[in-house]
Amino acid sequence: MTATFDHLVIAARTLDEGVQWCQATLGITPGPGGTHPLMSTHNRLFSIASNMFPNAFFEIIAIDADAPPPGRARWFGLDSLDLSSGPRLVTYVARTTALDAALGALRDVGIDGGRALDASRDTPLGLLQWRIAVRDDGAVSCGGAMPTLIEWGDRHPAASMPPSGVVLRSLALRGVARPAVAALGLETATFTDTSGPAIEARLGTPSGPVTLTSP
C-alpha cells in the first residue's frame, strides 16, 4: 500500500479571511478554487510543489454561506472548528490510486479512516472528480496527523497550477498516527516523539521561511 502527500488544508471562517491571512502570512494571493456542492464549502488553491513533494498544493477552505446545508457533517471538522482567532492548519490530504484498499489497511491497525464518498466541482477545464474518505462525524483523526485520503479521477488539480513562490520543505507529524501512516506507506512525512502540535509544515515563501502548525 502506498499513499503520497497531496495537499495541506487550512480552514477559515470565510474565504475572504483566508485570503487576507495568506497574503499576510505567506506573502502571496491564493489562486482560484471552486465550490463543493456535496459539502456546501468553497476553496482557494495554489501550488506548493517541491522536489520532495511533487504536485503538492495548498487549500484554504471555508463553509459556503450561500449554499444550502449539506445534510451531513462537513469534511475536515468544519462544522465544529473554533476559527475565531483566524485561519489555521487542520490536516493534510494524501492521495492513493486504491482508496478502498487504503481504508482497509487503516481498519487493520484500528483507525477509522472514514467512508469513501464521490465528489466533484466545476472548473474552467471541465468537471474535476474525486473520491474522498470522510468520517460520519466529519472530524479529522489523530489531531489531523492521520491524513484524509483521496483518489483523484482522470485529472489532478495541481497539473494546471502555476508556481506560486511558496514551496513545501518538510512535514513533521506527532502522536498516535504513526501506525496509520506506516500502513499507508507515506514516506515523505517524518515522525518526532517530542511533545508539540500534531502537524508541523515548513514552507519556503517570498517572505522567508514559515512554519505552520496545528493547534
Image (spheres, helix red, strand yellow):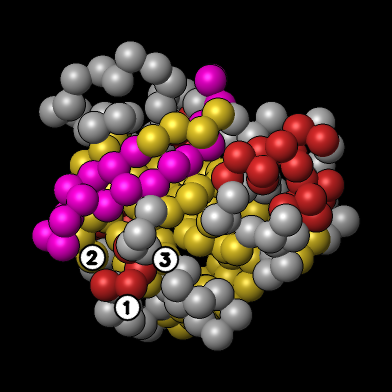
- Numbered label attached to residue 31: 2
Tell whether position 127 is magenta. Answer: yes
| Residue depicted at 39% across the width and 47% down the height | 130
| Residue depicted at 39% across the width and 35% down the height | 118
Q: Secondary structure at mark 1?
A: loop
| Residue depicted at 66% across the width and 38% down the height | 103
Q: Quadrant of the C terminus?
A: top right
Q: Mark 1 or mark 2, which is nearer the start of the sequence? A: 2
Q: Which residue is mark 3?
A: 57
Q: Secondary structure at mark 3?
A: strand
Q: Residues within 10 Å of mark 1 (few under 14, many from 20)?
A: some
Left or right placement of residue 8 versus residue 102 in this view: left
Tag 1: residue type?
Ser
Left or right placement of residue 32 versus residue 188 in this view: left
Q: Looking at the picture, tell me which residue is in the foreground, 96 or 204.
A: 96
Q: Which residues are magenta?
A: 119-137
